């Protein structure tokens, strides 16, 4: 992997603030989401079907909102404003979980929370790209992803500890979760300064044909690659199912996600920094090989120890690829269309993830876990082939070669 953009500059303070904001909001959200199914069934008397329908509706809401918020951030030229609205909406939905006495209230809170996630996603990623020096975008996205994952790991652990301390008092734990959510919003308002020079074409409709054409063939190729990638990377819920199926006790199963998140958090920033110095395509290819290896290990696992090894590889591939994909989108998208580019990319990838998870569930029920993970490995290798055949460049980035 040849050197790309060696640099000794430091990341802007606002990038660190955005990472801390993501961490705090993930702590808040995961403290609630890790307990919410138990709360809905045990306290409110909801059925398993109701839980599944609500989760599907919530994710569909987040996906639908993502693309429009990115487009709007390009049109208004206000990335931070939309990010604040998104984080604020999620933060102010948290008290509704604590006071909820019915499924209607929980549904309202859940949809508001996911709408907030959808609103903030693309503008925040575009803001990271706007703030970071072009030669440090990989490090910037890796840092934000790493801190975000720390929050995703810490939230459930904190919730579990508080449930033990307070004798399974769901509502008190939910009230505690309000605090990091509110802190995240305040930190974003006070700690991030939006650059004045970006975006460059405020007031232009990003959905006009001539504007979408400016995204270029490299961008649409990357969207297609992202879709194929997500078909290979189905929901992590199947890692948990595999651990239980291979003999791990119920009390230990949550440690699977904690282990994956820990590896992800520890690897995202170092690999993000590495991506600023090496070929993006080569590093993404390595990540795909690690994903295929994770699937192979999970397929062949004879006990829970093998599952843990596969989970570690899965977390490593996440650290290698997720921030990298964001940096690649930023490289190929014009500055004034970055919100739109991230919105469309996230929408396509999210929809593909829903499809791949449904397909994985079908394969699991019909043919078993071994076939499911083997199929994931095949899709990873197909994505690797598509990556080898493609070429990409961008308006402010040199041609990237494997």
Image: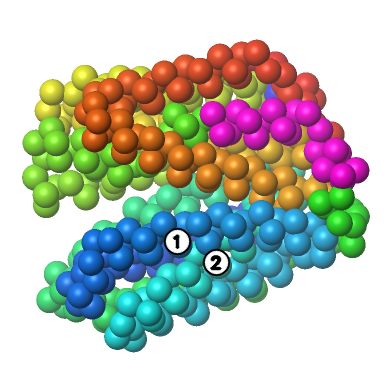
Q: Is residue 195 left or right of residue 186?
A: right
Q: Quadrant of the N terminus?
A: top right
Q: Is residue 50 above or below residue 378?
A: below
| In this view, the mark in front (1 or 2) | 1
Q: CA distance from mark 1 to mark 2?
A: 11 Å
Which range of residues does the magenta coloring cover? 209-228
Q: Position of residue 97 (x, y in %)?
A: 36, 78
Residue at the image position 34 percent from the left and 53 percent from the top: 153
Residue 76 quadrant: bottom right
Mark positioned earlier in the residue sequence (1 or 2): 1
Residue at the image position 65 percent from the left and 35 percent from the top: 223
Residue at the image position 89 percent from the left and 53 percent from the top: 200
Q: Position of residue 342 (x, y in %)?
A: 67, 47
SS type, badge 2: helix
Q: Residues within 10 Å of mark 2 (few under 14, many from 20)?
A: many
- Whether residue 234 is visible, yes or no, is no
Q: Quadrant of the C terminus?
A: top right
Q: Is residue 195 left or right of residue 144?
A: right
Q: Tell me the number on the disc at residue 315.
A: none
Q: Tell me the number on the disc at residue 115.
A: 2
Nearest the eye: 237 or 279: 237
SS type, badge 1: helix
Q: Is residue 23 above or below residue 392?
A: below
Q: Residues within 10 Å of mark 1 (few under 14, many from 20)?
A: some
Residue 369 quadrant: top left
**Residue picked out by circle 1:** 57
Residue at the image position 38 percent from the left and 26 percent from the top: 376
Nearest the eye: 249 or 26: 249
Residue 357 lies in magenta, yes or no?
A: no
Q: Is residue 30 above or below residue 140?
A: below
What secondary structure is the stretch in magenta mostly built from? helix
């Amino acid at each position: 992997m040849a050197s790309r953009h060696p640099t000794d500059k430091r990341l802007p303070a606002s990038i660190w603030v955005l990472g801390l904001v993501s961490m705090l909001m993930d702590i808040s959200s995961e403290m609630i989401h890790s307990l919410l199914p138990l709360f809905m069934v045990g306290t409110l008397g909801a059925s398993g079907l109701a839980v599944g329908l609500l989760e599907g509706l919530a994710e569909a809401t987040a996906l639908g909102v993502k693309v429009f918020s990115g487009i709007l951030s390009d049109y208004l030229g206000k990335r931070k404003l939309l990010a604040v609205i998104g984080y604020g909406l999620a933060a102010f939905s948290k008290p509704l979980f604590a006071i909820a006495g019915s499924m209607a209230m929980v549904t309202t809170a859940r949809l508001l929370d996911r709408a907030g996630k959808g609103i903030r996603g693309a503008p925040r990623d575009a803001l990271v790209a706007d703030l970071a020096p072009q030669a440090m975008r990989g490090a910037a996205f890796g840092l934000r992803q790493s801190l975000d994952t720390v929050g995703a790991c810490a939230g459930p652990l904190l919730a579990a500890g508080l449930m033990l301390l307070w004798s399974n008092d769901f509502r008190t734990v939910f009230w505690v979760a309000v605090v990091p959510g509110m802190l995240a919003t305040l930190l974003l308002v006070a700690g991030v300064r939006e650059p004045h020079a970006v975006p460059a074409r405020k007031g232009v409709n990003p959905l006009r044909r001539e504007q979408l054409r400016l995204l270029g063939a490299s961008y649409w190729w990357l969207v297609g690659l992202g879709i194929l990638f997500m078909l290979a990377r189905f929901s992590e819920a199947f890692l948990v199912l595999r651990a239980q199926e291979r003999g791990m006790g119920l009390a230990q199963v949550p440690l699977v996600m904690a282990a994956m998140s820990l590896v992800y958090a520890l690897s995202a920033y170092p690999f993000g920094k590495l991506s600023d110095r090496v070929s993006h395509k080569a590093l993404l290819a390595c990540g795909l090989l690690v994903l295929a290896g994770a699937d192979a290990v999970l397929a062949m696992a004879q006990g829970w120890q093998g599952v843990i090894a596969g989970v570690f590889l899965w977390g490593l591939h996440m650290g290698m690829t997720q921030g990298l994909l964001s940096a690649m989108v930023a490289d190929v998208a014009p500055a004034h269309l970055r919100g739109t580019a991230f919105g469309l990319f996230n929408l396509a990838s999210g929809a593909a993830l829903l499809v791949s998870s449904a397909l994985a569930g079908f394969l699991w029920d019909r043919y078993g876990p071994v076939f499911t993970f083997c199929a994931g490995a095949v899709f990873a290798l197909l994505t690797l082939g598509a990556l080898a055949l493609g070429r990409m460049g961008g308006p402010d980035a040199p041609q990237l070669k494997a």
